Each structure stands twice: as structure tokens, then as C-alpha cells.
Image (tube, rainbow, N blue to C red):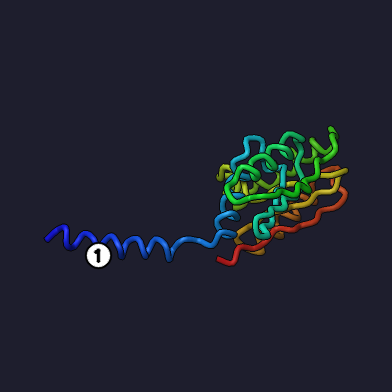
Amino acid sequence: MLKALALPILIIAFSCMVSAAPAPGDRIGREVRHELRMLPYYTVFDNLTYKVEGSTVTISGQVVNPVLKSDAEHAVKSIEGVEAVNNGIEVLPVSPDDDRIRRAVYRAIYRAPGLDTYALRAVPTIHIIVRNGNVTLEGAVANSGDKSRAGILANGVSGVFRVANNLMVDKS
């Protein structure tokens, strides 16, 4: 009797697994996101984005460490189903002043009560991009108050010329 019940149960279980299987583009997108987040030199001072079009992945953003640009491309190329990678990642110029601003903006944002919780993740959700004294905030926050506060704190750092607050408010 157990054998007679086992086959229909296996057929039902398999059909549920097949119907729940993601579309190939969705799978590739999830794997790209995972691979980029797991890069060893990926920090809060880098911003990596991607776009999947069929079997072609376009990666872009800004990084401080030049090794991260090539590491990202190699990681994405290794994903099954990816046939081509367009690497548009910009390596930010080396600048002691920009490094000082990065650290100061990081301290201003992530030491602020309420915003400090965003620092508790492996890669914090507020990314700080600094180029020639201009700061861009990328990533996501829980509400518009946190977005505004992060922008105000970044703008208050000495040496910052301009702040572009591109933080997205999470709707969930």
C-alpha cells in the first residue's frame, strides 16, 4: 500500500517543484545579485548595479578598488546561462581627500541613532560614493525620514561640495 501511495505523492511533489521553478532570467538575476554581494572587496563605498537581458548581463556602478571591477566581471561570467558580460563599472580616482570624506560620511550616517541599524548587515544598505568631494548616496532605506536624514548628515561633513541622495524608500 505504501508503494501505491508513494508514486502519486512523488508526481505531485515534482509537479509543484516544476511549476515553482523561476524563469531563466529571474534565476540569472538572483545569481548575479548574490555573486556581486559576495565579492570579497565589495564595501559600503562601492555601488554595483546590473541588468539582465536574456543571456547578456550588463554590470555598472562605481568602485574604489580596481580589482573589484574585474572580480565582478569574472563572477558574473561564471554563472550558468550567462553568455556575455558588458562591464561598465567605473573605478573611482585615487584621492586622499575623497578617502577622508568617505570615512567622515560613513561615521556621520552610521553613528546616528536610528540610521545605525542599517550598518548591521554584512553589506550595509546605504552606499557612499565620493568623487572629487561630491557625495552620492545609493541603496535603500525603510522610510523617507531616514532618506532625508542621511542626506542632511552627509551634507554636513566638512569638505563635501554636493550630495546627490539617490536612496530609495523600501515600500514593503
- Taking depth in this image into account, of 13 and 59 the one nearest to the observer is 13
Q: Which residue is mark 1?
A: 8
Residue nearer the viewer, 169 or 105: 169
Residue 151 drawn at (x, y percent): 75, 55
Q: Position of residue 93 (x, y in %)?
A: 85, 38
Q: Is residue 102 above or below residue 143?
A: above
Which image quarter holds the N terminus?
bottom left
Q: Quadrant of residue 11?
A: bottom left
Q: Residue furthest left?
A: 1
Res 113 visible: no
Task: State how many labels appear.
Answer: 1
Mark 1 falls on what kind of element?
helix
User: Can residue 149 be seen at all in this image of the molecule?
Assistant: yes
Quarter occupied by residue 41 = top right
Which residue is located at x 65 percent, y 59 percent?
Answer: 54
For badge 1, the amino acid type reads Pro
Front residue of 49/81: it is 81
Residue 74 sits above or below residue 56 on the image? above
Residue at image location 55% in from the left, 65% down from the top: 172
Q: Position of residue 66 (x, y in %)?
A: 77, 35
Place of residue 10 in the rendered image (x, y in percent of width and height, measured from the top left) = 28, 60
Q: Residues within 10 Å of mark 1 (few under 14, many from 20)?
A: few
Q: Residue at x 70, y 58 (%)?
A: 167
For image coordinates 72% across by 42% down, the residue present is 45
